[in-house]
Amino acid sequence: MFTKKPHQKALQHFVEEWTLSEASWLALQMNQSNFKDSFENYKLEAHITKKGKPEVSQIHWGLNQSHLNIETLLHSKRHISGKLDFKDNNELTAMFNVEIEGFIHAFFQRARDLLVQSGKKPATLDGINPQEDKGKEWLRVSLEVLKNALKEVSTNRSDNGPEVSQGLFFCGNHPSTNKFTFRLRIFNLDLELQEDETKSLRVTVYNKKNQESFDNLEPVLQMVFNREKQDVIEYLINILPPVALTITPKKG
């Protein structure tokens, strides 16, 4: 099914077919492109396997002063593409905002489920790394600082401020390696965690501080978490709601 312009039936069909609960890989882009000259845009993507074949569903939306641009993929096929003018489509725009909020909630709930599944797999690596406690505490403090920054963005957005989050998020079994991977690049931090063959978490964190990009940086944390794996997973789970709140539609 392909629709050039968004309308209620097409959006309802997308909602009904959106299979986030089965997704093995999730991807999110936050203001990473100039999507149709938007000043705020996001792309959510979910990969599932159906009857042995990979499928991708995706929704990409961009907000302008006068309208909302929407593009979707459903089961790897183009589905919706067009714009909603606010003054002519108030009811449909309101419906879209409600559905988007639901998508975002389901997206991060699935990310949480994938993290929990990883945390339940005990690491089998022998020996104890005496630096794990230190690395875990560094990660805890850094994520608390990040959480506060995210809350500030969401609070200002609720007051109709211009603040947005910008970055990337991935979670699940990587389509190329089939290894559990978590990636969050937002503000000055770039965190990547990968489950290795021993079920330990290999964590690499970059902090660009005042640099313009993350290129050619040395990691500020690089560690294998074995004994402390579950606590690290819990820290990541706790950062998901603040990220979600920075991309939910503004009220009013």
Image (spheres, helix red, strand yellow):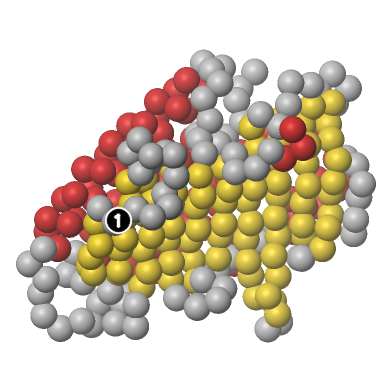
Residue farthest left in this picture:
130
Residue drawn at the location 55% of the way across and 65% of the way down: 25
State whether residue 205 is above or below residue 172: above
Q: Please state, as top left, top right, bottom left or bottom right, where the N terminus lies in the image.
A: bottom right
- Residue 10 at x, y percent in the picture: 85, 48
Frontmost residue, 93 versus 9:
93
Badge 1, how many Cα within 10 Å: few under 14, some, many 20+?
few
Residue drawn at the location 51% of the way across and 71% of the way down: 174
Residue drawn at the location 38% of the way across and 55% of the way down: 216
Residue farthest front in this picture:
216
Relative placement, left or right, of 110 versus 13 is left
State whether residue 12 is above or below residue 145: below
State whether residue 100 is above or below residue 198: above
Relative placement, left or right, of 241 versus 134 is right
Residue 187 location, quadrant: top left
Q: Is residue 106 in view?
A: no
Q: Which residue is mark 1?
A: 218
Question: What amino acid type should be assigned to the residue bearing mark 1?
Answer: Glu
Label 1 sits on a secondary structure element that is loop
- Residue 19 at x, y percent in the picture: 66, 61
Relative placement, left or right, of 176 versus 13 is left
Relative placement, left or right, of 131 versus 10 is left
Residue 65 location, quadrant: top right
Q: Please state, as top left, top right, bottom left or bottom right, where the C terminus lies in the image.
A: top right
Residue drawn at the location 76% of the way across and 65% of the way down: 75
Q: Is residue 214 in view?
A: yes
- Residue 189 at x, y percent in the picture: 36, 45
